[in-house]
C-alpha cells in the first residue's frame, strides 16, 4: 500500500472492527496501516473479509498477515518434505517449487549418506527460511517439473499438476508425446500388418509387395 490507500484501508478496518463493537482510534488505524503497508490493498481487503467470516474476534494486523502469507500456495514444511522425498527416486517425475528445490539440494548429501532424520530436519529448516524470505520479498510462487526416467508414470504426474493449477497445460503438452491421431493409428496398423506378413515368408517378391503397400498407406 501507499499513502493514497490510507482512506480505503481505514474504511475497511473500521468497518470490520465495528462488527465486533470496537471503534479503533486514529493511532490504532495508523499503526495497523503501517504494519500492513507492504501488502496490496486488494489482498488486505480479501484477507479481512475472509477473517471476519470465520472469527468471533476483531482482526489484528498479525491475523491478517497470517492470512496473507498462508494464501500464496506454498505448502508447509511437512507437505514440502513429502514432495521432496519422491525426488530422491530418479525414476519419478516430481513437480517442485524454488523453495523446495533449494532445500532439497541442501539436504541431498545427508539423505544419500543414510541419515534420513537429519536430512528431514535440515530440509525443513532450510525450506522454512526460504519461504519466509520469499514471502518477505513478495516473490511469486513458481512450480516446475523435474522429469524422472519412468516415462510411463510421467504423464499422470504432469496431468495432475495441471488439474491442481500448478503447471499450465500448454507447457505440459510440450513435455509429453503428441496423441496418436486416427490417421496415425491407420499407419501403425498398416506397418504392423506388413511386417507380420513379411515375417511369414522369405519370398523377396512378397516382402517387396508388402513394403510397397505400406509405403502407399503412408502417402495417403
Image (cartoon, rainbow, N blue to C red):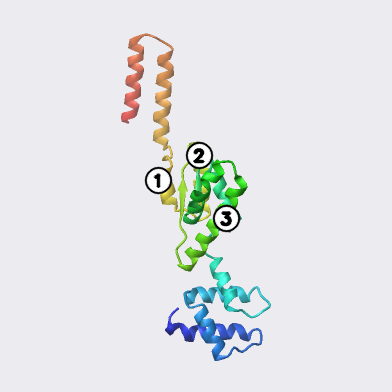
Task: State the residue position of label 1.
Answer: 174
Q: Quadrant of residue 199?
A: top left
Counting from the top left corner in percent of width and height, residue 197 is at 42, 16
Counting from the top left corner in percent of width and height, residue 32 is at 54, 82
> Which residue appears farthest toward the right when viewing the image?
56
For residue 213, above or below residue 107: above
**Camera-side mark, 2 or 1:** 2
Q: The N terminus appears in which quarter of the rendering?
A: bottom left
**Is disc 3 surrounded by few (<14), some (14 to 19) or many (20+) residues within 10 Å?**
many
**Camera-side mark, 3 or 1:** 3
Task: State the residue position of label 2.
Answer: 90
Out of 38 and 49, give the one closest to the viewer: 38
Q: The C terminus appears in which quarter of the rendering?
A: top left
Sequence-earlier tag: 2 or 1: 2
CA distance separating discs 3 and 1: 33 Å
For residue 149, above or below residue 56: above
Horizontal side of residue 39 vs 17, given as left or right: left
Out of 212 and 105, give the one closest to the viewer: 105
Q: Name the residue rendered at 68%, 77% in the picture.
A: 56
- Numbered disc 2: secondary structure: loop
Counting from the top left corner in percent of width and height, residue 68 is at 54, 70
- Numbered disc 3: secondary structure: helix
Sequence-earlier tag: 3 or 1: 3
For residue 96, above or below residue 185: below
Q: Name the residue rendered at 42%, 39% in the picture.
A: 177
Q: Quadrant of residue 188?
A: top left
CA distance separating discs 2 and 1: 21 Å
**Camera-side mark, 2 or 3:** 3
**Marks 2 and 1 close (CB-CB < 8 Å):** no
Task: State the residue position of label 3.
Answer: 124
**Is disc 2 surrounded by few (<14), some (14 to 19) or many (20+) residues within 10 Å?**
few
For residue 90, above or below residue 60: above
Amino acid at each position: 500500500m501507499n499513502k493514497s490507500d490510507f482512506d480505503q484501508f481505514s474504511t475497511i478496518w473500521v468497518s470490520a472492527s465495528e462488527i465486533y463493537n470496537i471503534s479503533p482510534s486514529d493511532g490504532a488505524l495508523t499503526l495497523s496501516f503501517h504494519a500492513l503497508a507492504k501488502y496490496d490493498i486488494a489482498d488486505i481487503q480479501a484477507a479481512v473479509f475472509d477473517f471476519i467470516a470465520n472469527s468471533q474476534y476483531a482482526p489484528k494486523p498479525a491475523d491478517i498477515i497470517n492470512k496473507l502469507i498462508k494464501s500464496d500456495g506454498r505448502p508447509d514444511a511437512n507437505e514440502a518434505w513429502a514432495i521432496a522425498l519422491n525426488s530422491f527416486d530418479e525414476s519419478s517425475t516430481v513437480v517442485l517449487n524454488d523453495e523446495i528445490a533449494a532445500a532439497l539440494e541442501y539436504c541431498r548429501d545427508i539423505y544419500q549418506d543414510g541419515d534420513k532424520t537429519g536430512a528431514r530436519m535440515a530440509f525443513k529448516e532450510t525450506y522454512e527460511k526460504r519461504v519466509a524470505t520469499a514471502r518477505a520479498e513478495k516473490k511469486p510462487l513458481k512450480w516446475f517439473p523435474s522429469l524422472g526416467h519412468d516415462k510411463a508414470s510421467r504423464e499422470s504426474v504432469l496431468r495432475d499438476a495441471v488439474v491442481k493449477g500448478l503447471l499450465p497445460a500448454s507447457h505440459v503438452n510440450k513435455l509429453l508425446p503428441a496423441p496418436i491421431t486416427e490417421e496415425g493409428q491407420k499407419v501403425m496398423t498398416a506397418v504392423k500388418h506388413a511386417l507380420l506378413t513379411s515375417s511369414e515368408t522369405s519370398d523377396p517378391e512378397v516382402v517387396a509387395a508388402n513394403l510397397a503397400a505400406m509405403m502407399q498407406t503412408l502417402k495417403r
